[in-house]
Amino acid sequence: MPTETTRETRETQEIKEQRENKKGSAVLTPDETPSFPVGLTLGAVFLLVNLLVAAIYFHVINP
């Protein structure tokens, strides 16, 4: 029967500092958020691509 070995790592001060600095880094600030026209353009492109795929799937467009 194989034995499982656990590997323990010690958290260094550098790792603790990096973790503290990264808190909340996934949240966008108001300066980093994309503009409304960019979101509208991305939404329109997404919608058009999905409509094209649906039209091909339902044989509205026969490639």
Image (tube, grey):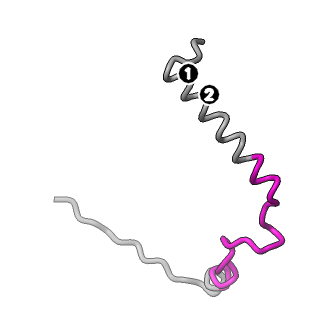
Q: Position of residue 40 (x, y in %)?
A: 76, 51
The quarter of the displayed image where residue 14 is located: bottom right
In contact (CB < 8 Å): disc 1 and disc 2: yes
Q: Residue furthest left?
A: 1
Q: How many marks?
A: 2
Identify residue type, mark 2.
Leu
| Residue at left offset 77%, top offset 74% | 29
Tell me the residue at 82%/53% (across/down): 37
Residue at the spot x=55%, y=21% of the render?
A: 56
Relative to 2, is 26 on the left or the right?
Answer: right
Task: Assign a secondary structure to mark 2.
Answer: helix
Residue situated in front as seen by the camera: 45 or 19: 45
Residue corresponding to mark 1: 56
The amino acid type, in three-letter code, at marker 1 is Ile
Q: Which mark is residue 13?
A: none
Among all residues in the image, which is located at the extreme front? Answer: 60
Measured in 3D between alpha carbons, the distance from the residue under mark 1 to the one under mark 2, in whole angstroms, is 6 Å
Q: Quadrant of the N terminus?
A: bottom left
- The residue pinned by badge 2 equals 52
Which stretch did the figure color magenta?
17-41
